[in-house]
Image: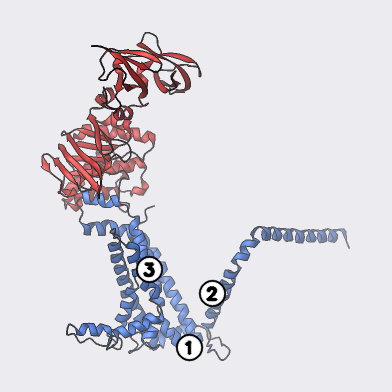
Chain colours: A red, B blue
Amino acid sequence: MAASVELKKIRKSYGDVEVIHGIDLMIEPGEFTVFVGPSGCGKSTLLRMIAGLEPITGGDMLIEGDRMNEVPAAKRGIAMVFQSYALYPHMSVYKNLSFGLETARAPKEEIERKVKRAAEILQIEPLLQRKPKALSGGQRQRVAIGRAITREPRLFLFDEPLSNLDAELRVQMRVEIAKLHNDLGNTMIYVTHDQIEAMTMADKIVVLSAGHIEQAGPPLELYNNPKNLFVAGFIGSPKMNFLKAKVEGQDAGSAKLAVAGSSLTFDRKVNASQGDEVTFGVRPEHITITEGSGKHFSTVTVDLVEHLGGQTIIYTTTPDGTAMTLALEGQREVPLGSQIETYIDTKRCHVFNAAGDVV
Amino acid sequence: MTASSLESGSRGAGNKVGTRNVLAKIWQQDGPGYMFLLPWLIGFFGLTVGPMVTSLYLSFTDFDLLTDPNWVGASNYVRMFTADPKFAAAMRVTFFFVIFSVPLKLAFALLVAMLLNRGLRGLPLYRAIFYLPSLLGTSVAIAILWRQLFAGDGLVNQFLANFGIDGPSWISNPRYSLWTLIVLSVWQFGSPMIIFLAGLRQIPQDMYEAASLDGASKFRQFYKITLPLLTPVVFFNAIVQTIEAFKSFTPAFVISGGTGAPINSTLFYTLYLYQEAFGFFRMGYASALAWFLLAMIAAFTAFSFLTSKYWVHYDD
């Protein structure tokens, strides 16, 4: 049971202050969509509007083609997992799972069957008689998801459900939620500020900033072809390097940029004029120090080296004093203060104009 | 003097010096603290513990304020249960008052707290206004005002007359007199209301959001979420208000003129105790009454705590 969700010019205002500015979005049935963005960008507000917990100021919200703006939350066929889990502390796990069904006056056998199924899926059968206070963070999270499963909704909503867990448990639960999506096949909308969660779980990522959608698409599409500086900076870890650059000249099939004290020739045209100040973007993992692995880029000074085991992160400074990060595969011994040559594949670099849009 | 006695003498002197050193050290360390505590300690032992112990002793005597007390054993306590119909009347009135005034006051306080919890504009003002009767409620002035309101020609009957209702004299009619005191008690709902309001604000909003997504009506949300999560506050308020109700004195004293009239219908336990002590100077018997009241309150409190594990839900 999966449903499509369509947002048409959705707006939200608190008094005179508009916080969501006309969002258009289509979520296909069964799709795992992640709303991602910095704090205050409106991602949770948008989710709560879909849930029916916040009134919609303008535009239309459709589930399976039916307008839902005025439909009460309980009648939208959705279930939501809250950041705080919102488990009822005075009820056992069983009662927490069955609350929605009991409210709907479902037959006892049906309640038992659905609770059992959810408990099996989430492997929480031994916990059914416990109270939430006797559960660990991960177990509480499972119960919160179980409560959503028992309702058999057509749409699952998750509001930063992993942010209260420690790093290890977060990774584990991330995998479990992704598996749950594969098993159930429901449409899921997931809100997070953690771009790694977004990248690893989503079929579609929606990057939000200040109440606007900056870009929506599959994770690798956003990673490889960010539309603007915001998305380029937000997606990817370590963050993309941004360096000031100037268009030195271009012809039909190439462009020449002055960047980081070097002159770099691109094998494609950029949509800017000679002399324009632009921003050059390159991801840390797309810079190498091996000669012949790309075009020579710049000679940089090593400031700090972080050994992560499978990867070595090198923090450097370019000749014009700009900070630049390199992420190299494997374990590399690079002396601090040394000067190293860097190489890049210009096909994997990005150029942004003064407005921040890719050119 | 033998060598051993010399030795023990010097050891004794050494012990004295040692004790003095320890006391000096304690005084140096804690002395200023005890000095700050001294006014309270004087009050606690002089005005609370001392009189309590004395009254416990007096409860086993026939003390009448004028002559020396004579030990009478448990006869004051025996008299209470076997030969004092007024004691039975006072118990009846007090229990009736406790059983009706406490739940009504708590229910009303919770209702107002829930209304105030709905993000009302000017909330601090309303909170102050509603709290005011709790500050004034037990005063003599309010009791006198209450007598004027519920008198035969009082404001209540004047108001009822507008609708053609000929109201009774609420205070002098034994059927209604206790109820006017119950209404006065309920009117002093401010204190439990403030505590309920604080408790309501502790309930996370997302519990209600989760429940509304589950399709729970406002009523179901109230009795399945609000009420269970509020039980620690209900428990606290119930104990405090019940103790207050058992101890209630001023309104009954003022409204009945200190007699518990009409026909003992407002003869609160404490009022009867006062009559015995300062009307008939039976201090020994009044002391026994006071200790029995304490025992009742203690038993009620202990019972409440023992049963609380079945109905009070603590988050942690």
Decide: few, some or many residues near mark 2? Use Cα within 10 Å; few <14, some 14-19, many ≥20.
few
Q: Secondary structure at mark 1?
A: helix
For disc 2, the marked residue is B48
Residue A150, x across and y down, in percent: 21, 44
- Residue found at x 14% / y 45%: A68
Decide: few, some or many residues near mark 3? Use Cα within 10 Å; few <14, some 14-19, many ≥20.
some
Place residue A230 in its image quadrant. Answer: top left
Q: Nearer the viewer, mark 3 or mark 1?
A: 3
For disc 1, the marked residue is B278
Chain hosting mark 2: B
- The residue furthest front is A275
- Using the numbered discs, state the Cα–Cα distance from disc 3 to disc 1 in whole angstroms: 31 Å
- Residue found at x 33% / y 82%: B146
- Residue found at x 55% / y 79%: B54
Residue B69, x across and y down, in percent: 56, 87
The kind of residue tagged 3 is Ser
